[in-house]
Each structure stands twice: as C-alpha cells, then as structure tokens.
Amino acid sequence: MSAIKQRKIGIIMNGVTGRMGTHQHLMRTIVPIMREGGVWIDNDTCLMPDPVLVGRNEARLEKLATASGINKWTTNCEKALSDANNIIYFDAQTTSRRVQSVKTAIEAGKHVYCEKPTALTTAQALALYHQAEAAGIIHGVVQDKLWLPGLLKLRMVGKSGLLGKILSVRGEFGYWVFDGDGVPAQRPSWNYRTEEGGGIILDMFCHWRYVLDNLFGEVSAVSCLGATHIPGRWDENGRPYGANADDAAYATFELEDGVVAQFNSSWTTRVRRDDLLSVQVDGDHGSAVATLRRCFVQPLSATPRAVWNPDIDDPHDYLSDWLEVPDTVAFPNAFRAQWELFLKSVAAGTHFRWNLLEGAKGVQLAEKGYESWKRRAWVDIEKLQ
Amino acid sequence: MSAIKQRKIGIIMNGVTGRMGTHQHLMRTIVPIMREGGVWIDNDTCLMPDPVLVGRNEARLEKLATASGINKWTTNCEKALSDANNIIYFDAQTTSRRVQSVKTAIEAGKHVYCEKPTALTTAQALALYHQAEAAGIIHGVVQDKLWLPGLLKLRMVGKSGLLGKILSVRGEFGYWVFDGDGVPAQRPSWNYRTEEGGGIILDMFCHWRYVLDNLFGEVSAVSCLGATHIPGRWDENGRPYGANADDAAYATFELEDGVVAQFNSSWTTRVRRDDLLSVQVDGDHGSAVATLRRCFVQPLSATPRAVWNPDIDDPHDYLSDWLEVPDTVAFPNAFRAQWELFLKSVAAGTHFRWNLLEGAKGVQLAEKGYESWKRRAWVDIEKLQ
Amino acid sequence: MSAIKQRKIGIIMNGVTGRMGTHQHLMRTIVPIMREGGVWIDNDTCLMPDPVLVGRNEARLEKLATASGINKWTTNCEKALSDANNIIYFDAQTTSRRVQSVKTAIEAGKHVYCEKPTALTTAQALALYHQAEAAGIIHGVVQDKLWLPGLLKLRMVGKSGLLGKILSVRGEFGYWVFDGDGVPAQRPSWNYRTEEGGGIILDMFCHWRYVLDNLFGEVSAVSCLGATHIPGRWDENGRPYGANADDAAYATFELEDGVVAQFNSSWTTRVRRDDLLSVQVDGDHGSAVATLRRCFVQPLSATPRAVWNPDIDDPHDYLSDWLEVPDTVAFPNAFRAQWELFLKSVAAGTHFRWNLLEGAKGVQLAEKGYESWKRRAWVDIEKLQ
Amino acid sequence: MSAIKQRKIGIIMNGVTGRMGTHQHLMRTIVPIMREGGVWIDNDTCLMPDPVLVGRNEARLEKLATASGINKWTTNCEKALSDANNIIYFDAQTTSRRVQSVKTAIEAGKHVYCEKPTALTTAQALALYHQAEAAGIIHGVVQDKLWLPGLLKLRMVGKSGLLGKILSVRGEFGYWVFDGDGVPAQRPSWNYRTEEGGGIILDMFCHWRYVLDNLFGEVSAVSCLGATHIPGRWDENGRPYGANADDAAYATFELEDGVVAQFNSSWTTRVRRDDLLSVQVDGDHGSAVATLRRCFVQPLSATPRAVWNPDIDDPHDYLSDWLEVPDTVAFPNAFRAQWELFLKSVAAGTHFRWNLLEGAKGVQLAEKGYESWKRRAWVDIEKLQ
C-alpha cells in the first residue's frame, strides 16, 4: 500500500461572516470537506483545504471560528494575502467591495474564486477577467444553480433526446416576501434599496444567464420590464422604509437557434406551482419541468390531445400526465460540488470553465435587463471576450 | 291568469356552418333557448328566436337544419336581409368576410352581433363601429370568456376585497396542438397560415384585451414576441404544408395603475398547471388563480413564509396552500349568457356594453402586438373612440 | 469591541412552589432566560434576573432550588423585601393571599408583577391599582393567553382585513376533568370548593376579559349561568368531597359596536373540536377559528353556499373549507414573552400596558358574571378607573 | 288468502304550492306513500291517501297536479271542507293565515295536521288546541326534526345508558346566508323582515322546544339575546332592502333536573363543525354529538385525560376520540315518518302525541325568547295546558 499524500491548500475566505459565506461556503462546503478528509484528486493524493477566515468584525469572526473549528482568522486581509501558503483567494463580501478586493488578490498572484455578481458593471467585470487572464491565474465564479438536482436532471433529460429540438423555455421564480409589518421579511432590507445594490434583476439575472447559456443556448437579446410593486416595507428593526429597487421582473430572452425563454422573477407573488423555482422546457419531441430538486417529463407519445371546451367541466388532471425523473444518482450540495471542481482545477493547473468571463456575462445580462426596461425595447447581448 | 306574450325575433345566422357557429352559437345557444321557451324579458313577455341559417354550402346547411330542427336556411344572405322580420344579423364567418358582410347588414338597418375579430385592421374595426353608431342600431361582439365560470369567480373574489390592491397578473394559455402527422391536429390548418387570417396573436389578443380591460384595468402598452415554433404541419387531408403564422406569443402588458400582466399564449406547449388557461392575480392582500371553470385563493394571512433553501428537500406542498372558491351560483354556457343579454338589449332598445367599439379594441391589441414584435419595442395603446 | 454590560435585576418570586409558579414562571421563564444570558434591552446591555425563591415550605423550596440551580431562597418574605437589590416583587401565591402581599411589596417600593386573579373582589383589585399608581411603581398582571400562538395568529388575521367587520365570537373552552374516583383529577380539589377560591367563572373570566377587550372590543355587559354539574369528587388523597363551586359557565357578552361573544367554559364536557380552547370569529368578509396554537380562515369568496336539506346525506366536508394560517414567525412561551416585556418596562422605567387596572377588569368580569347568575339577568360592566 | 282492504282517506292539503308543502309534504311524502300502495295499519288493511290540492294560484296548482299526478285541486277551500270524504285538513300556508284556516277546519269537523309555527302568539296557539280538544278531533303538528336520523340515533344512545345522567347540551345551528349581492341568498327575503313573520328566533325556537322536551327534559326557563348582524341585504330581484329581523340568536335554556342547554342559531356564521346542525350532549358516563344524519359517542372509559398545556404543540387529534353510531336501521324521510304516524292515529281514532298543545309550546318558547331579549333577563316557561 502506497501512502496517501495530503496536499494542504491555503484559502483566504473573505466575507465569510455573511449569510452565504457562512452557511453555503464555509459550513456546508469547506468544513465538511475537511471533516471528510479532503478532496481526492487522484488515487493517492488528497487536497486538504487550510482556510483563513477574513472579515471586518472580530466578534463575529471569533464566533464563527468556534462554530467551524477553524482557528485561523483575521481582519487584516493584506496580511493573509502576503502569506505564500494561501494560494486561493475567495470573496463573498457585499458586491460593492468585490472588484477592488479581487483586483488586489490577483495582483498578489492568488487564484480567485468569488460570488456573483462579480461587479456592478459589465466593464468592471470584464476588466477583472482580463486582468486575471493576463496574470495567468485560475479563476472561478459561483454558479451554483447548475448543480441543483432539478437542473442536473433536466440536463440529463435533454441529453437523452426526449425533448427533441427545444422550442421554448418558461421560468417562474419567486414567492411572497413579507413586508416586515408583523411577519418579518425573509430577505434583508438592502435587497429593496437601489443604493445598496438591491433589486431582483441584479440578483437573479446573473443566475439566469448561466442557466440559459449552459442548458438551452446562448442568450442573444433581452426584453425586460421591472417593477417595484411594494413601495413601503419594514426593516430588520421594525422600522418602515421606502423601497425603490425592483421587486419583480418580467423578462423574455432570445437564445440562439430561435429558442424563446420567458422568465418571471418576483418577490411579490404567491406560489401555485411545484416549487419556488420551476423551469418548463417545451421541445418538439417532449417537455420537461424542473424544480429545485425534481424533474418531470412528458414525451410526445404520452401528450394528451387536449381540446378547448370551456363549456363543460373538464375532469382531466393535467398534473397526472407527467412522469417524475427518479433519483438515479446522488446529488451533493450544489455549492460544494462546484468548489470541489475548482479545487481540482487549481491542483491540476487547468482552466476552470465557470470563470470570470462567465461571471461577467451574468453582470452583462442584468445590465442589459435594466437598459431594456429603461429604453422600453429589446436589447441585443453582444459577445464578451 | 294573464296570458304569456311571445315576441318572435328574426335572426340571420351567417356562417353558422363553421365550428363555432354550429356548436356554440346554434346548438348550445339558440336551439336550447328555443326549446326552453325563449328568453324572458319581463314577467309575462318572452322573446322567441326565429333564426334563418345562412351559409355557402347547401349540403351542410341542409344537414344542419335537420340536426337543429330549424327549417329556414338559405345561401342567399341578401334575401334574408331583405326580410323585415329579420331584425338581427349575426356573423360567424371567417374573419376576412366579416367587414363587408356586417357593413351590408348595418346598411340594411339590422342590429348586429358578431364573432371576433371584427376585422383584420383596427381602422376597419373602428369604421364598423362608427357606421353602426351613425345608423343607430344595437351592436355586440362575442366576448365569451367574460362569462367563463373561472373568470366570474375571479371577479367575485376581487369584489370581495380579498386581493387588496392588484399588483400583477400572469396568464398562461395553451396546449400541444399536434402537427397532424399521425395524430390529427386539434385546430384547423388555416390557423397556421398568415394569408388566411391565422396566427395566435390575432386569435387570442382579442380575448386578452377584454379580459384585461374588464377584470384588471385598461391596457396601456404591450410588448410582444411571436414565434413560429413548428414550421411544418399536416392539414385536414393529411397533406404537409408550411406554417408561417405565429403559433406562440410571449407578451407583457402594462395596465393602468401600474399593474403588469404577463401572458403566454402557445399551441406548442404542454400543460403542467390546473387547466388550459390559468390566470394568477397577485395583490397585496391576497392572490387568486382562475382556470376555465374554477378559482383558488390564498389570503395574505394564510400565505406561507417560504424560505429559499435549495440545498434540502422541501416537503411543502404549495398547492395545498390554496382554497377553492365554491360554486355558489349556477353558470350558464358563456356564449348563451352573452346572447341572452344581447337579445334583451335589442328588445329593450338599449345600448349593449360589449359592442363594436370593444371589439375594435381587441383588434387593436392584436395589431399593436404584431407591431411590437416587428419593432422589437414596447408600443403604447392609444384610446379608441 | 465594546464590552457587554450586564445589569442584575433582583426578583422576589413568592409562591414559586405552586404549580404555575414552578412550571411556567420559574422553570420555563426565569431559568431559561438566565441560561441564555438574560434579556437584551439594547445592543450592548443585558438584564440578568437574580431571583430569590420565596415560599412557606422549606423542603419544597430547597428541592426547587436544586432543580432550578438557583441557590437563593427563603421563607421570610419580609427579609427579601428589605434587600434593596430586589427591585421586583412577583406573586404566584393562592389568590386569597395575594392582596395583602402585593400591598406590602408596594409599600416597600418594589415593582410588582403578579398572577391573576389579582384579588377576590373588584374593590380590592382596584384599590391595589390605585395604591401602585400612587406609589409610582411599575406593575403588571399575567395575561398569558394574549401570547398564545393561536390568538396571535387570530390578531394577525384581523389586522390583514380578512374578517371585515366582526359580527360575533364563539368561545368553547373545556375538557373532561375526571372526578378523581379511579382516574386522578387533572385539577386540584380547591378548584371545586368556593371557600378556597374555586370556581370556573373566577378562574376563566379573568382570561376572557383581556382576550375580548384586546382582540374583539371592550366588554359592556354579561349574562352568565353557572352550574355545578358534578357535585361529588375525590381529592388528591382519594377522599370524596362535596364540590360546591361552579364547574361550568354558559355566558354571553356584549362588546362595543354590537359584537356578541358567546363563551362556554366547562370542566364537564368532552372535546369534539380542534382543541381544548377554540374561538370562532365571524365577520362580514370572512371567519377565523383559533385554537391554542393554530388558526384557520375562510374568506367570504371561499364560503360555501350551504343549503339546508336534511333529507339526504350531505357528503360535504365542512372542515375542508378552511385554510390554516402558517407559522410565519416564531412564538416563544407565552408566559416568558410577557415576562420579558415586563422586565424591559422596569429597565426603561416605562408604564406597562397589562397592569393592575387590566387585572382588576378581569376580577370585575368574574364578579359581574356571578352577579348575573344570581340575579338571572344581564349585568352592565361599568368602566373602571 | 284474505283480501287486502284499502281504506281511502281524503286529505285537504292547503298551502301545498309553498316550498315545504310541495317538496316535503306532497312530493316526498304523500306521493310516494300513494305510489307504494298506502300505509299499512294492520295485516290486511291499508290506508290510501286521497288528497285534494288547495292553493291560491290556479296556474301553480295545475302545474303541481301535473307534476304529482294528483288530479284533484281547487282554490276553493270551503268547498273541499264541505266534502265529507275529506276527513283530514292539512295546513302549510304562511303562518299568518294558519289560525283562521285551522279554526274553520275544526269547525267543519276535520282532523287537523299542520306546519309550525301554529300561530303567531301563544294565546292563539293555545286557543286552537282547546278548540280542537273540545271538538274531539285528532290533531297534530309537524315536528320533523324528531325523525332526523342523527337525533334518532342520539335518542338510542341515551336509551342505551351510555350518557348516564345528562349534564348539559350544546346546540350549534347555522351557516352563512349570502346577502344576495352577487351570490343569491339561500333563504327568502321575508325571513329578514319582522313585519312578514321573519326572524330566526320565531323560525327555530319552535324546533328547539320539541327537540329539548323530547330528548333532554322539559324547558323551564330561557335567556336569549337576538341580533341583526347584517342590516342590509338584496332580495330575490336583486334589490337592496333593510333587514330588521333577528338573523342570529344566542340562547341558554334551563331544563328540568338542572340540565343546561346552550343553543346558538345563526344565519351569519361559517361552519367549522360536522354539519349545519350539531348537538352535543355531555353526561357523567359519556357524551354524544348528533348531526343531521350521524351521531358520534365517547364513553367515560374512552375519554382522554386532557391536560392544559398550551406551551407546546398538541398533536392529539380530538376528533379521533369519537366513535360513530352505525346505521343499524333504515331511516325514512322525517316528514313522511311523522305523517304515517298521524294517519295511523286518525285511522285508529287515537290521540296523537305531537299535537296542537306541543305546537303551542313551540310558539311559547319563541315568544318567551323575544321577551327575554327585550327584558334582558331570564324568563320562566310556565306549563301550558
């Protein structure tokens, strides 16, 4: 028996005290990877993350260190960057701090992995990409929804040929976010303030871009109408405030090959569908509906011959015409799945597919969505490079 | 006991051999009205329709006369118009013949009731309206969906105050129309040919206009993307043909007071929802979802506090959060309901609310929908008068 | 990082060896508050209870001290009152001892928090209130049902507008208390003896008063019939005794604005309803039914059109016409919730809303209930002040 | 084999064109009795009803004659009374016409059977009884609820000893009667107008009297609060009107032996219980709940030992603690069951138990209910004789 080689890999985790940083990236990804002995990169080599927690509030860092069992933490990011053992810089800070921090990390020669949106403008996002490429580092951006079990199943359905040629896609995302008067809101108040980076278009179009590009075809144009349906809300301390960011977006996308994708995103709708997110794909040979973790199909040969006859009660149960895609493989946490792939890329020194260019495309789609809303017209999505 | 007064009312039914004319207008409306003794207009007066069937094919007319038990029929519409006993002209011909026929009927002094679209252009539709007004006749246009049980229940829900202020509306209409290769198509082939008045925008936007105007607020602008997803189909005789008309439309409407209505119409989608048509209305105090004949509600106080957590299976059944609106009143056939109101208007000599102006608005919305598609931009809907 | 300031707050807990004192006030409220680090009154100040347990039985006090981990206890209440660190006096003794003890505590300058009923007569209860006001202390009375999840949800439903104008309220409280012959009774025997302060009217009307006043409107009149349905019972030691206190009460209340509230309270009924307590509110726009921890609603638009037809089996399931109000907020223990509010009032030096005047109103309603029973007539409830 | 003797029995059915007269008395009782060959009174004798339909509207009588197949009808009641073959006079007219008509029938020597209320005042109702007794005729009053399957089962349960001594009774009757604005009301508008004999107390207390007297003990006192919760309604023609009659009544009755019966009657409540009417009886040995057609029991030995503990979720399903009384006998239509008994009494020449004295008691309870409401006090029910 040959000995197992464990390679330590230093990771600066900046902004890890935020909601996503703590739960998704640290507690559900890095900590379990460490507890389970690291990420295997070949038969006898294992990558073991060696994180340092970085944030701005000492008390919260200390508490998180205790909770996670990770004893390295600091409020001094520069110092962490100066440590040559730390070869990866991860960023989950609020969006407005991302560009400068990532820039500094690249200058320090670190590989970079970061949350979306990568920047507040396409120009900045693209500049980061160019800088990273010039520096020769490996870079990645979180695109977790690609590893959602429902979307993975949908991809398998597409690959199986059941859909035939894809004709159209419908996405319905949303739920009722309480206004905070009585029932506390499920989202932070900054989401509803433009000046703090709020807005559902900025938040969600980054996701829709990579979902569409990867599953159904490259986005070539967007038509988007935003709205602030609920103008007054109550914040975390029960104080009323004016909401000026978009809380709903009604968008249609054109994809290559004439596929049309219509997506509604809303924090002001109630859910009468399978899940908080559902994506229906209609093809000439069949259709599929994906939820967060499930997927249902209806092949052409089992498609009912519905007839429009509203005069009489229709006892047909349309939900019963679909068949669920079974769980044939295990699905790890989506964030962890992408992290492991990134760590392997770094270990192997290879290009990472979901990188800063892909991240910039997400920012671009949000930017173009706002432009479309303002101009009241379709806006083409030029290719970034 | 006072005697019952029966007033005969002569009706020219032109185009009654077509699908809608035969089933909805003749066999499910005029024939049962006659069999049940007419339409009561006050305690002792009853209107008894006295129809004459008009069409272009003698054999079909004769067959229909036998089936309906109505022995008056002719291929000579002019003759029917010259009979002073016939005071109503009804038109269910193909759209391209409607304008000229209605025009002639108005000139002959008849009251007019007709199918939609009333014309192929807004200008023509509006001209018909002006002509009818100038002639002082009573005129009406079929807007049957307003009497669908599901939409009537939805209106009652709105009136009851459950929705509060309406924020947005989502309409999803459609089903899979087979291409005719093997399984026969559920719709006639002319629906898929532009030159014969086909196209889902022209067909459905006439409906969406009066549904939106009457239930949620006047339409002020439209953004629409059409598509011909299935370019090749097989006709009634099994012969392949090229389809050039739009078979799907992705539209967003702006209504007064900032309400946004997003409506998909498609003959190329499969149904994973309550019914072939479903309309969801979200308000700040509650939501409702109407299908053709049913309606479901979710008040604010019973709205679940959904939390986005795609990592773990969500056992919540979102359909169980809704309560069905019960059948508290009897709902007659929608076509018959509107016919009876029109007959009463004629008997009373009063203005009919759903008239040629309303019909013209439907044509206008379809026209503007096509314009939006072509211009790739939002198009405002100016007020017609 | 600024240091956390912890303010100790001495609390004399008199009568803490009784059932309510031990379970609700000590073990489920003060002890967990202490274990969880106190009550936060602002971002960096925390109130830490410092209780002294007071009772009449040394052995029970010692045992309770061990169970709770609170090492200060005494049978000498006077001594505890003389300690200036003890700024709150809490009383959970039997009702007959309450007035004198609270009086003494007020004279000693303590803030007062106590169980209900605050006295055996309205005059005494009101005198306590006046004494407390004159002394300038902060005072509160336990009104725990206001923090029951079911009633909190009911209040949210009312606030959401679903009920419209409230027409009537029906309360059904009760369950079968075994007579102690074989199956031990679930309630102490003194509950069934008038001379020891027993009686369901005295016990429950204190609750109904604040529930009605706070949720549905001020009580203006009462009609009450009491009964001693089970005249013979067996006590804690298995000895038979004569029960002379009321074990059931049938009451109707008039509230402001013409609302009628009909409440049955009984220890001699069996439960065929959602819970031991259920409160139905009917309004012109909808109804709600609250249980201890749940709430169900039926809006007007989903109200079935029931028709009286007892000849034939009615397959309708009336329970299915209701929608449950989901758990959108976390509900702490009701007793603890009110305690924390009281502690904050004391810390801030502000008036406490549920005070000795409110407590006196509860005693008044019980007194007027007994008067109505005796006089066999409606009795008006004059305003206390 | 001896021959079957068929005895014809002439019955004047006055007011048979009304709702109850037509459906319950004629179509569901007399007509099926006739079709099934009459009522057997001993092994070889059968009573065959020979009805004459009496009303005020010829057209409606003629239509009813056709529907029922009974060819004798007249608008001249006097003539029918003068026919010696008609030995029974039945009255289902509106209440205001009953007294004079019944009086005339007794004077004509007819046996009398009639609907409730028998009169608008106790004095009149009692006078009718005295007149009938003096005339030596056999007389009966409809008390159909006694033959409801649910109440028959309840009586069987009581007889079986399961309840032990009855302690208390709770009746909950009612449902939401729509106000007629949109959804048509389920009850006639005169029900809501005092001047036309409306009011729920007058309507329902006639029933509660015989239900209480026969099942639980004679009523000795009443306390009643009425209310007009919905002051504005829309009538059969969609016209708004002011409602001044009581639409809800909150009553408590004292029965002999100290039994307390609390009954709510309401046309302004929504149903969260087993049925439109439910009656719970609590006894020291067990409880029973009757609905219109079902009955559920809980014996002492299966009574759960409920403990009041609102702090924690109570997963106990209280509805599952009850056992349904099975259908061990067939239950005929309640109206028909009483009719058959009355016909047998007439044939045998014997006293009928549910007679004009019992009918007068019903009127008395309504009268005393209104008096209690007005006087805001308990009112004793003196014995009628």
Image (cartoon, coloured by chain):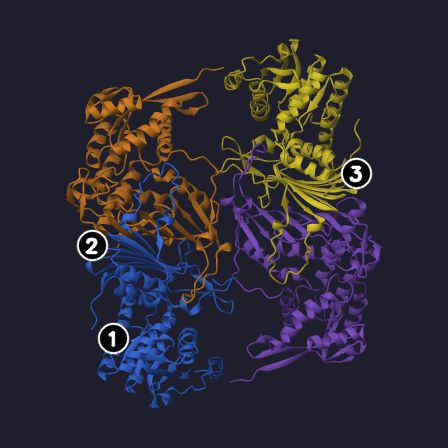
Chain colours: A yellow, B purple, C orange, D blue
Do badges 2 and 3 share one subunit? no
Q: Quadrant of residue D341?
A: bottom left
* Residue B53: image location, x then y, percent: 74, 75
Q: CA distance from mark 1 to mark 2?
A: 31 Å
* Image position of D104 with respect to C79: above or below: below
Badge 1 density bin: few <14, some 14–19, many ≥20, Cα 10 Å: many
Badge 3 density bin: few <14, some 14–19, many ≥20, Cα 10 Å: some
- Front-lying residue, C369 or D308: D308
Q: Chain of mark 3?
A: A
Residue occupying image coordinates x 82% and y 59%: B196
Q: Which residue is mark 2?
A: C375
Q: Chain of mark 1?
A: D
- Front-lying residue, D173 or B285: D173
Q: Nearer the viewer, mark 3 or mark 1?
A: 3
Q: Quadrant of residue D304?
A: top left
- Residue B331 seen in render: yes
Badge 2 density bin: few <14, some 14–19, many ≥20, Cα 10 Å: some
Q: Which residue is mark 1?
A: D126
Q: Quadrant of the N terminus of chain D?
A: bottom left
Specify whether A85 is left or right of C63: right
Q: Which residue is mark 3?
A: A256
Q: Pointers 3 and 1 in contact (CB under 8 A)?
A: no
Residue occupying image coordinates x 56% and y 31%: A188
Q: Name the kind of residue labelled 3 in the image.
A: Glu
SS label for mark 2: helix
Specify whether B65 is left or right of D57: right
- Residue B385 seen in render: no
Do badges 1 and 2 share one subunit? no
Q: Name the kind of residue labelled 2 in the image.
A: Arg
* Residue D140: image location, x then y, percent: 29, 76
Q: Name the kind of residue labelled 1 in the image.
A: Leu
